[in-house]
Amino acid sequence: MIMQHASMGMAEIDRTGKIIHLNTKGEDLLRPIWIANDMSEDNLYPILEYIAPTVTKKIKESPDEAGHILTNELHSFSFSFGGESIERHFNFIVIKMFTDCIIVGFDDITQARKKEQAIEVLLSEKAVVQGKFEIASNILHDIGNAVVGFGSYVSRIKRSLEHNNPENLQKLADFFATQQTSIATAIGDAKAGAVIKMLNGIKESHQNTQEEIGKSVIEQLHIITHIQDILNIHRRYVNGHELQEIKPMNLRSIIKDCMSMLFASIEKRSIKVSINIPEMLPIIQGDRTRLMQVILNLLKNSRSN
């Protein structure tokens, strides 16, 4: 029932790719591609080869023991359906429960991807070079980076909430644990153990999700605050009032906040960032927003080179 009513596509396959179970959302996402390419609907490998060949390769090359095969892997593809060329972007998660039980999760993030691309196109267009038009271009650039980072955290929260039902999962895990002997009689010790292990894994995953939600919410609040700060300082420039707000501030906190704002664009480019900041830095006096702009510009220039 958990798989069947999940808000993302989920398929259970064996080692040969044969589909043991495909939920309703998965059928909706895959059927147009199956029809357009005249593919058989009883094996997942052919369609994976078409839309995400590296996913198939990683599944086939994965070790026999249970564990994550891949997480949040984005694949883009296009196909013709009804005389129309359709572009899609799918995000994949693959977990091996045991040798002959592999769970493939996939979600259509095309709309979110198109919005991100639209923002990038908008930010890449050159504005007028002089005066207040140049300031307006910088505002769009700063807001765009902040919005991309904000969208990343919102998406993470949305996915977490869609799969969040910890109380029922706890009850289900406890029930199966008490009935393990009976289940083993019906389906065997190995499969019964695998079921218990899978439920406990799902339960632990939900607990981790709750922690992730908390972190994401905090990041969103920080990002919103920084957007307002950036807008305020630019409004002063546009109006001809360069007012400095000198306040005590922690440089470590400012650097971490700047990294949060650029998280999505850095992650998209697969850039690895190492932060080495002393825990105890002296409090300095300065204009937080203007200092953030300096650090953001340094990070943006480093990222683009």
Image: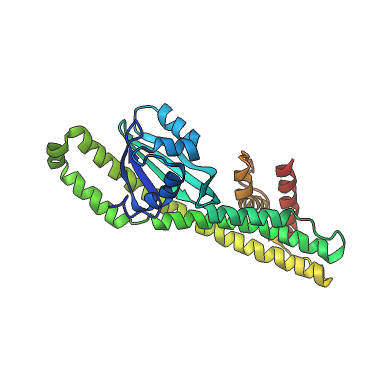
Q: Quadrant of residue 235?
A: bottom right
Relative image position of residue 299 (x, y in whole percent) = 71, 47
Q: In this rendering, does residue 298 appear at all?
A: yes
Query: Between residues 15 and 257, which one lies in front from this camera angle?
Result: 15
Q: Residue at point 56% right, 57% down?
A: 151
Residue 28 percent across, percent down from the top left? 40, 52
Most extreme residue toward the bottom is 239
Q: How is the image coloured?
A: rainbow
How many marks the image carries: the answer is 0
Q: Is residue 225 above or below residue 22?
A: below
Q: Is residue 284 visible?
A: no
- For the C terminus, give its image quadrant: top right
Between 304 and 3, the one nearer to me in the picture: 3
The residue depicted at 12 percent of the width and 42 percent of the height is 182
Q: Could you tell whether 305 is left or right of 180 in the image?
A: right
Looking at the image, residue 245 sits to the left or right of residue 63; the answer is right
Q: Nearer the viewer, residue 73 or 31?
A: 31
Q: Find the residue positioned furthest to the right.
A: 130
* Quarter of the view holding residue 11: top left
**Residue at the extreme front:** 83
User: Would residue 282 appear left or right of 154 to someone viewing this image?
Assistant: right
Percent x, y of residue 225: 62, 64
Residue at point 66% right, 63% down?
A: 227
User: Against 123, is 234 above or below?
Assistant: below
Image spot of residue 39 (x, y percent)? 41, 40
